Image (cartoon, rainbow, N blue to C red):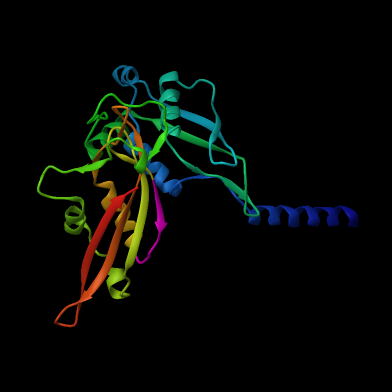
């Protein structure tokens, strides 16, 4: 009995050590970003929508040590159109590989999505579109993400007012977080993302963080921007981009610190 208890204790300690040293694979930006991206990207299959078909899709995915999707398998009984849409979106997602004691390793995970027409209609009303409109065609379907420097034409933001530029748009719409003002926090938040062929963004990642609400505000404002996609070979392609937002507090003549927002974008 004593030997059994010792063996159990050693096994429990080993499992705890493994759990503490293991970090599972996760999508770039975390699970909240994944949910947001699915809500923005998903298009309900037309035939299923017209016929009133609904259902839940469950899949198991495998991520290798480089953060690449090796395989996705779907549960039996899933409607093929639903599975195809989930697969399309999964192929757009970049992943942080799992690590064991700081060494990248392969991993697997499980994901479920419920196709519900009422919820989808609410979602479309909230986001403002029922399908993706492509501002430049044809589009590249290889899934390759191009670097800014390798493009024929670079992405640029689209605004309804042609007199405004990106820096002006950000300065006019960004709200300096109250917590950052109170704590006198200033500095640069740099965000990388992918401009998709339809002009919306994916795979948003904070590469230079600031805190006090500045990171969240930078993400919020970047999500508002629609882009003309970059092109290669006269096709719209996926492009890796970055935006740096400088949160700065200038002291005015009254002694108060006033927000001063500057920004830049590129590769």
- Residue bounds of the magenta highlight: 204-213
Q: Name the residue rendered at 29%, 39% in the picture.
A: 200
Image quarter (top left, top right, bottom left or bottom right) of the N terminus: bottom right
Q: Is residue 6 left or right of residue 43?
A: right
Q: Quadrant of residue 227?
A: top left
Query: At which x and y percent is residue 193?
Result: 36, 46
- Residue 118 or residue 15, whichever sits in front: 15
Query: At which x and y percent is residue 258?
Result: 20, 72
Residue 1 visible in the picture = no
Q: Quadrant of residue 156?
A: top left
Q: Is residue 174 left or right of residue 114?
A: left
Residue 146 visible in the picture = yes
Query: At which x and y percent is residue 233?
Result: 32, 27
Q: Name the residue rendered at 30%, 35% in the picture.
A: 152
Query: At which x and y percent is residue 204?
Result: 38, 47
* Vertical side of 216 occupied by 125: above or below: above
Find out whether residue 211 is within the magenta segment: yes
Q: Name the residue rendered at 62%, 54% in the picture.
A: 102
């Amino acid at each position: 009995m004593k030997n059994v208890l010792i063996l159990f204790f050693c096994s429990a300690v080993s499992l705890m050590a493994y759990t503490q040293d293991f970090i599972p694979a996760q999508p770039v930006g975390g699970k909240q970003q994944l949910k947001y991206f699915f809500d923005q990207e998903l298009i309900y299959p037309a035939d299923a929508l017209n016929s009133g078909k609904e259902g839940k899709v469950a899949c198991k995915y495998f991520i290798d040590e480089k953060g690449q999707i090796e395989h996705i398998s779907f549960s039996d009984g899933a409607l093929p159109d639903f599975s195809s849409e989930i697969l399309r979106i999964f192929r757009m997602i970049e992943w942080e590989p799992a690590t064991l004691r700081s060494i990248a390793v392969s991993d697997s995970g499980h994901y479920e999505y419920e196709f519900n027409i009422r919820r989808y209609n609410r979602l479309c009303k909230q986001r403002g579109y029922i399908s993706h409109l492509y501002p430049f065609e044809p589009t590249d379907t290889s899934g390759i993400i191009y670097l800014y420097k390798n493009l024929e034409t670079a992405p640029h933001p689209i605004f309804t007012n042609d007199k405004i530029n990106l820096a002006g748009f950000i300065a006019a719409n960004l709200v300096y977080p109250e917590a950052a003002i109170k704590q006198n926090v200033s500095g640069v938040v740099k965000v990388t993302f992918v401009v998709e062929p339809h002009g919306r963004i994916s795979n948003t990642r904070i590469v230079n963080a600031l805190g006090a609400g500045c990171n969240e505000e930078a993400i919020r404002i970047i999500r508002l921007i629609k882009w003309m996609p970059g092109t290669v070979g006269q096709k719209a392609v996926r492009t890796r981009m970055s935006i740096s937002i400088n949160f700065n507090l200038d002291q005015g003549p009254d002694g108060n610190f006033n927000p001063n927002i500057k920004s830049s974008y590129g590769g």
